[in-house]
């Protein structure tokens, strides 16, 4: 069974607006002759850093969780992580996020993107094969 956390449309529009503003202002600044690219290396690096932060925030806002008797496949928007069923100690609600986390036998925890708190019991059932 798979749960998906979709990216909000408002975030997509905000990302597009950020790209247009940062790139547009950068081009206008250099084409207008106000500053040469060689003199504004720090400003260019900072603009690129802002774009990277915006893209990473956008990617991290999505994700999915797939549960089976073999374990969990958790995709946090950037990369997928496979967690075998033997490594999972339990699945619990996470009131901070309004979702769920899987506690691991090794002592860590993995956020389950897309799984609402109401579906924690269903994830447990799928992992146990019911």
Image: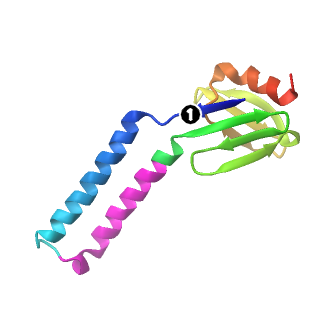
34 is higher (above) or lower (below) than 120: below
Q: What residue is rendered at 87% in x and 26% in y?
A: 129
Quarter of the image where one finds residue 14? top left
On the image, the x and y values in percent for residue 54 come to 41, 51
Q: Is residue 67 magenta?
A: no
Q: Residue 8 at what x, y percent from top left?
A: 44, 34
As drawn, is 51 to the left or to the right of 79? left
Q: Position of residue 76 (x, y in %)?
A: 61, 44
Count of picture labels: 1
Q: Residues within 10 Å of mark 1 (few under 14, many from 20)?
A: some
Which residue is drawn at the image coordinates 73% and 42% (left, top)?
73
The residue that appears at 71% across and 48% down in the rendered structure is 81
Q: Is residue 75 left or right of residue 49?
A: right
Q: Residue 119: horizontal and vertical position, in percent? A: 68, 21
Quadrant in the picture for the C terminus = top right
Viewer-proximal residue among 34 and 95: 34
Q: Which residue is identified by label 1? A: 5
Q: Residue at x 73, y 28 (%)?
A: 92
How was this image coloured?
Answer: rainbow
Above or below, comparing residue 26 to residue 36 in the picture = above
Magenta part of the protein: which range?
A: 36-57
Q: Residue furthest front?
A: 1
Q: Residue furthest bottom?
A: 38
Q: Magenta-highlighted stretch: main secondary structure?
A: helix
Please tell me whether mark 1 sits on a helix, a strand or a loop.
Answer: strand
The front one of 43 and 2 is: 2
Q: Is residue 49 magenta?
A: yes
- Name the image quarter holding the N terminus: top right
- Relative to 73, is 116 above or below? above
């Amino acid at each position: 069974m798979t749960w998906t956390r979709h990216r909000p449309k408002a975030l997509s529009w905000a990302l597009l607006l950020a790209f247009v503003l940062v790139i547009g202002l950068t081009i206008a600044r250099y084409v207008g002759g106000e500053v040469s690219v060689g003199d504004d290396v720090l400003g260019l690096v900072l603009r690129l850093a802002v774009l990277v932060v915006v893209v990473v925030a956008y990617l991290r806002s999505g994700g999915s969780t797939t549960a089976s008797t073999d374990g969990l496949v958790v995709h946090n928007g950037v990369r997928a992580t496979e967690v075998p069923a033997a490594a999972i100690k339990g699945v619990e609600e996470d009131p901070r996020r309004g979702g769920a986390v899987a506690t691991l036998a090794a002592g860590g925890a993995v956020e389950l993107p897309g799984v609402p708190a109401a579906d924690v019991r269903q994830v447990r059932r799928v992992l146990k094969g019911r």
